[in-house]
C-alpha cells in the first residue's frame, strides 16, 4: 500500500482530507474541555498517591469518544512533562 497521495484516486484523497478536517474541528472544539479534564486528573495525584497512575489510566480509558480520550491523555502528558521541567 502506497502512502503517497499522488498515487491515490481523487476520492481517496478527498476522504483523507475530510477526515483530517473532522479531526481538526474536533480538536478545536474540545481542547479547552480536555485541558480541564487533564487538570482534574492531575489534581488527584497527591490524594491518590501510588494508586494514581492506575486510577488515571482507568479514567482515561473510560472517556468517550476515543478521540477525546486521546486528546485528554495528550494534555495530561504535556502537563506532567511541564511540571517535571519546572522542578
Image: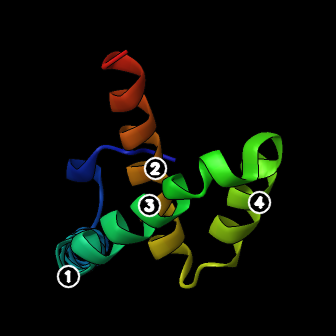
The structure residue drawn at horizontal position 59% and vertical position 58%, both measured from the top left corner, is 44
Which numbered circle lies on residue 63?
A: none
Disc 2 to disc 1, C-alpha distance: 18 Å
Label 3: which secondary element: helix
Disc 2 to disc 4, C-alpha distance: 13 Å
- Label count reads 4
State which tag comes first along the sequence, 4 or 1. 1
Q: Is residue 32 above or below residue 81?
A: below
x, y percent for residue 38:
44, 61
Mark 3 vs mark 1: give the one in front: 3
State which tag comes first along the sequence, 2 or 3. 3
Q: Is residue 84 above or below residue 67?
A: above
Residue 84 shown left or right of residue 73 in the figure: left
x, y percent for residue 72:
45, 63
Q: Nearer the viewer, residue 55 or 71?
A: 55
Neighbor class of circle 3 (other Cα within 10 Å; few <14, some 14-19, many 20+) is many
x, y percent for residue 70:
50, 62
Which numbered circle lies on residue 76?
A: 2
Any part of residue 23 in sight = no
Q: Nearer the viewer, residue 29 or 21?
A: 29
Any part of residue 58 in sight = yes
Q: Classify the position of the C terminus by image quarter.
A: top left
Name the residue tied to disc 3. Answer: 38
Neighbor class of circle 1 (other Cα within 10 Å; few <14, some 14-19, many 20+) is few
Name the residue tied to disc 1. Answer: 29
Disc 3 to disc 1, C-alpha distance: 16 Å
x, y percent for residue 36:
34, 69
Label 4: which secondary element: helix
Label 1: which secondary element: helix
Name the residue tied to disc 4. Answer: 55
State which tag comes first along the sequence, 2 or 1. 1
State which tag comes first along the sequence, 4 or 3. 3
Amino acid at each position: 500500500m502506497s502512502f503517497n497521495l499522488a498515487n491515490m484516486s481523487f476520492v481517496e484523497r478527498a476522504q483523507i482530507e475530510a477526515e483530517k478536517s473532522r479531526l481538526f474541528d474536533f480538536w478545536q472544539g474540545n481542547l479547552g474541555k480536555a485541558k480541564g479534564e487533564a487538570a482534574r486528573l492531575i489534581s488527584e495525584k497527591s490524594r491518590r498517591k501510588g494508586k494514581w497512575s492506575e486510577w488515571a489510566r482507568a479514567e482515561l480509558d473510560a472517556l468517550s469518544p476515543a478521540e477525546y480520550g486521546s486528546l485528554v491523555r495528550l494534555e495530561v502528558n504535556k502537563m506532567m512533562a511541564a511540571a517535571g521541567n519546572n522542578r
